Image (tube, grey):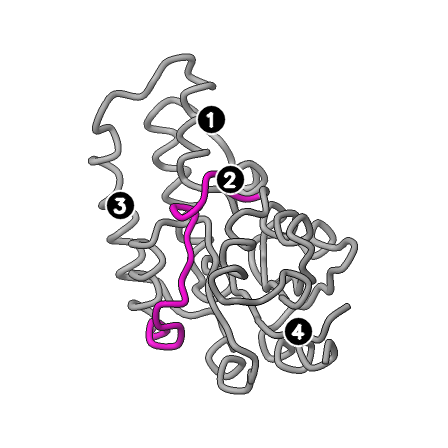
Amino acid sequence: MATPELAIFDCDGVLVDSERIAIKVDAVILDRVGWSLTEGEIVERFVGRPHAYMVTEIEAHLGTPLPDGWEAEYLPLYEAAFAAELIAVEGVVDALDLITLPTCVASSSTHRSIRRSLELTGLRDRFGERIFSVEDVSRGKPAPDVFLFAADRMGVDPTSCVVIEDSVHGVTAARAAGMRVLAFAGGVVPGEQLSGPDTTVFGHMRELPGLLGTFA
């Protein structure tokens, strides 16, 4: 395969340690709207997926559309929790300091959410305008669209990209894009669920620069 020319980072769970926070808030909201799920079930169903997918699944489970404006009550719960608790993933700042490849972000979150998370953790300036969102494409992960969009905008062939992901749906999307994957198992998804073709599973961000070097 081609020598890598671009490292594409997922955001939630890879750059910012947001998944654990969001899952707890998800559980509260789901219970309030009438669908009680364990945190493990939330991980399996929704981690790595766009928020719109979760809304669609809630409506399918309830058998009725959610009322207009229903989220207004709940969005402040995420904002308050993130403002109080969100930090960068352990070791990712040092890893970014050592990575010499061009980098960008490609996430299932909205542009507003990505930028807010990166600002809260001091990572915003690391990526400039090289931030791509599910809002830029028609299909979210596990479809490959956001990764292919990022590669196109960065002017890099997909086969020359390496994706750093932490979710099953994200890893699946990267493989479907024809990209190599470094799957971070230091978050909420066990490493055995992330392993597969063209994928190297690792457990700490201190390993990341060296792993990227092995592709050269």
| Distance (Cα) linking label 1 and label 4 | 37 Å
The mark nearer the N terminus, 3 or 1, is 1
Q: Which mark is residue 4?
A: 4
| Distance (Cα) linking label 3 and label 1 | 20 Å
The mark nearer the N terminus, 1 or 4, is 4
For the residue labelled by badge 4, is the local secondary structure a helix, a strand or a loop?
loop
Q: Which residue is mark 1?
A: 57
Q: Which residue is mark 2?
A: 46
Residues tagged 3 and 2 counted as in contact (Cβ below 8 A): no
For the residue labelled by badge 1, is the local secondary structure a helix, a strand or a loop?
helix
Tell me where the magenta segment starts and ends, as one range: 122-141
Residues tagged 3 and 4 counted as in contact (Cβ below 8 A): no
Residues tagged 2 and 1 counted as in contact (Cβ below 8 A): yes
Depth-wise, is mark 3 or mark 1 nearer the camera? 1
| Distance (Cα) linking label 3 and label 2 | 18 Å
Residue 16 locus on image (x, y percent): 43, 64
Please, what is the three-letter code of the amino acid marked with disc 1? Glu
Depth-wise, is mark 3 or mark 2 nearer the camera? 2
Depth-wise, is mark 1 or mark 4 nearer the camera? 4
Q: Which residue is mark 3?
A: 77
The mark nearer the N terminus, 3 or 4, is 4
Crowd tier of the residue under label 4, counting other residues whose Cα lies within 10 Å: few below 14, some 14–19, many 20 or above: many
Residue 131 locus on image (x, y percent): 40, 62
For the residue labelled by badge 3, is the local secondary structure a helix, a strand or a loop?
helix
| Distance (Cα) linking label 2 and label 1 | 9 Å
Please, what is the three-letter code of the amino acid marked with disc 3? Leu
